[in-house]
Image (cartoon, grey):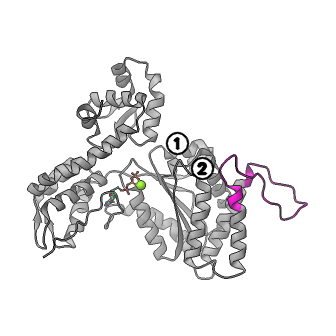
Amino acid sequence: MPPIPDPYTPGEVPRVLIGREIELQRVRDRVSRVATFGEMGGPLLVFHAPRGVGKTSLLRTAQQQAAAVGCVCAWVACTRKLPFLPELAHATDRALVSAGVVAEEPVRRRWRERLDRVSIEVGPPGVRVKGEIALDPDAPPPAPDRAPIGALEDLLHDAATLARGEHGAGLILFLDELHAASADDLGVLLNAIQNLSGERERHPVAVVAAGLPVTPEAITRAATFGERSDFAALDLLSDEDARALLTAPAETLEIGWSADALELVTDECRGHPYLLQLLGSATWRAASPEAGDILTAEHVRAGVPAAQSQLDAMYRARWGVASPAERGFIRAMADLGDDNVGRAAIAARLGTDSRALSVPRESLIEKGVIEPVGHGLVRFTLPGFAEFVRHRAPA
Ligand SMILES: Nc1ncnc2c1ncn2[C@@H]1O[C@H](COP(=O)(O)OP(=O)(O)OP(=O)(O)O)[C@@H](O)[C@H]1O
Ligand SMILES: [Mg+2]
């Protein structure tokens, strides 16, 4: 019999999303307001967590659920390289086109015109054309920086109305990696959402986002009222969920896990979804199980080198993108142990003033290498990184 293919998904959306029922329910509440009442689904909802904790997986699952109740879903992954508002306009267009709601004239022509106008307004700052192309030559031009906000409001209103149409539910925007959006673009988005919520019954749309733990701060910096967005931290998985992450994909293929194998993996991964998927996958590959087999602690141990070499590649990538000042900070942190580390201890270790650490600290948080854990303490976001830095980081 050919071996059963590995059901684990390190680095991809999981086959079974474990333990995010409360978060999914929060999105479903938004989606129901849009679908049932045809109104706006509340303020921006933002999930935040370090790398690998499951933001994209959560958003993708929520997207499937929203699509299943008839919503048109647009998806944007923000990057530092591209201005995000034009991406948002394109993604919305793609979603409407594939839902077939802008196929017929004259709707098609009107939507293209709206899109063209918006694309000009929300182009990259500097290239941005200020002021909407006036349809009425006598109308006064809108104030310059209001233009992209108004353009985005019009786009979202039109797209949401088209998505709802006669029989549809509405429009849901999913924005992943929101921390990477520029402050300018973020400000426009927040203002547009705020303005639309003033007449929420006219706009069947909701916006759900995810980003690194710096996202709430970036949002509040982009617009003070941004702090009234809904923020939800995504936690690591509980022990029970960690075990379910391992057993659920195997069970459907009639493969079991022994209790000590489960314990070994869950102790090692401490609730980190990516690590659990990685070690689950490595164990599976080491065992090449057939239906009815049990994965054992031996299989886990046999899989560790493959998982370790994948992890080393990730550690190396994080180390590789760090500047000299950031590496100094990382090294000092690693030398202080595997636990949470305070700013004063790092400063003492480097023989410098703790204020001098602000820049590397902020940039490492923004890169997702470290995260604040309260009381001025930070920790590495990927378990095992401190050990890597102490023993295996290139000089
Ligand atoms: N709730 C979950 N159940 C099962 N697997 C999960 C869950 N959450 C995440 N994973 C797995 O963990 C890994 C990381 O998930 P994901 O890519 O969603 O994280 P992320 O927070 O978006 O990370 P990044 O910040 O790097 O984009 C993936 O391999 C995914 O399969
Ligand atoms: Mg992601």
Foreground pick, 308 / 34: 308
Residue depicted at x 64% and y 77%: 102
Residue depicted at x 20% and y 52%: 306
Horizontal arrangement in the rendering, residue 298 relative to residue 308 (left or right): left
| Few, some or many residues within 10 Å of mark 2 (<14, 14–19, 20+) | many
Q: Residue furthest front?
A: 395
Q: Secondary structure at mark 2?
A: helix
Foreground pick, 202 / 75: 75
Give the dominant element type of the magenta stretch: helix, strand or loop. Answer: loop
Is 133 covered by the magenta stretch? yes
In the rendering, at what x and y percent does residue 322 appear? 40, 35
Q: Secondary structure at mark 1?
A: helix
Label of residue 186 in the image: 2
Can you see residue 169?
no
Horizontal arrangement in the rendering, residue 96 relative to residue 353 (left or right): right
Q: Is residue 132 above or below residue 228?
A: below
In the rendering, at what x and y percent does residue 289 appear? 13, 67
What kind of residue is marked 1? Glu
Question: Which stretch did the figure color magenta?
Answer: 118-147
Q: Is residue 7 above or below residue 279?
A: below
Label of residue 217 in the image: 1
Res. 318 image quadrant: top left
In the rendering, at what x and y percent does residue 147 appear? 74, 54
Would you say the beta carbon of the disc 1 residue lies within 8 angstroms of ligand 1?
no
Horizontal arrangement in the rendering, residue 221 relative to residue 51 (left or right): right
What kind of residue is marked 2? Leu
